[in-house]
Amino acid sequence: MIEIERKFLVTSESFKNEAKKNTRIVQGFLNTHPERTVRVRIKGEHAFITVKGIGNTSGTSRFEWEKEITVKEAEQLLPLCEKGMIEKIRYEIPSGHHIIEVDVFSAENKGLILAEIELNNENESFLKPNWIGKEVTGDTRYYNSQLSKKPYMVW
C-alpha cells in the first residue's frame, strides 16, 4: 500500500489531443494533517475514501489506503469535510506502459494544471511528453490537501 508517484507542472494543453478519457472529480478532506490526510472523492460515477500517510524525504513515496464507497455515502461525507473543496477534470494519457494523469483544476485552483505518474519504484524511467514541465514532486503546495487550504489563485 505504498504509492510511488511523481508530479509535474504542465506547460500546454496539447495533452488533451492524446487523452483517452477524462473524468470530473470533486473531493474534500476530513483531515489535512501532513502525517495523515483523509480524503473523500467522487470521481465520475464512483466514490472513494482514502487515507494517505506522510511522504518520504523526496515526497515520491507514501502510504495510501483507498476503499470504494457509494456516491451517496460520499455525498453525505463531503459536507463534513474541512473548508475548501477541490474540483478538477482528470485526463488519462497513455505514455509507454504508464498512464499519465493530468488534472485541470477549476474553482479556486483555476489555472493550475498538474501531471502525475505512478511508478513501481522511485527510479523507474518513463516517457516524458513534451508538455511536461518542471517537477514539483515533494513540494507540499501542490498536494491537493494543501490546495484545499491555500488555493492556487491566492499564491
Image: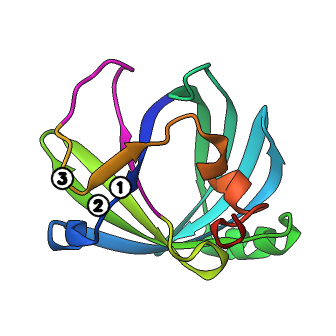
Q: CA distance from mark 1 to mark 3?
A: 15 Å
Disc 1 versus disc 3: nearer the observer = 3
Measuring from the top left, give residue 69's x and y in whole percent.
62, 60
**Secondary structure of residue under mark 2:** strand
Identify the residue at horizontal 78%, vertical 31% (top origin).
35
Answer whether labels 1 and 2 touch (C-beta < 8 Å).
yes
Q: Quadrant of residue 11?
A: bottom left
Residue drawn where x is 39% and y is 20% of the image: 122
Percent x, y of residue 148? 73, 63
The disc labelled 3 sits on which kind of residue?
Asn
Instruction: Tell me which numbered mark, 2 or 3, is placed earlier along the sequence.
Output: 2
Indicate left or right for 153 with 1 as reference. Answer: right
Above or below, comparing residue 133 to residue 126 in the picture = below
In this rendering, the answer to whether 74 lies above or below 2 is below
Residue hosting label 2: 92
Is residue 1 in view from this perspective?
Answer: no
Specify whether 128 is left or right of 55.
left
Q: Is residue 69 left or right of residue 88?
A: right
Q: Nearer the viewer, residue 93 or 46?
A: 93
* Residue highlighted by disc 1: 101
Please provide percent x and percent y for residue 135: 42, 40
Q: Is residue 47 magenta?
A: no
The residue that mark 3 highlights is 130
Q: Residues within 10 Å of mark 3 (few under 14, many from 20)?
A: few
Q: Earlier in the sequence, mark 1 or mark 2?
A: 2
Q: Residue at x 70, y 53 (%)?
A: 145
Residue at 83% across, 65% down: 81
> Cα distance, mark 1 to mark 2?
5 Å
Highlighted range, magenta? 113-126
Spatial CA span between label 2 and label 3: 16 Å
Left or right of 34, for residue 72: left
The amino acid type of the residue labelled 1 equals Glu
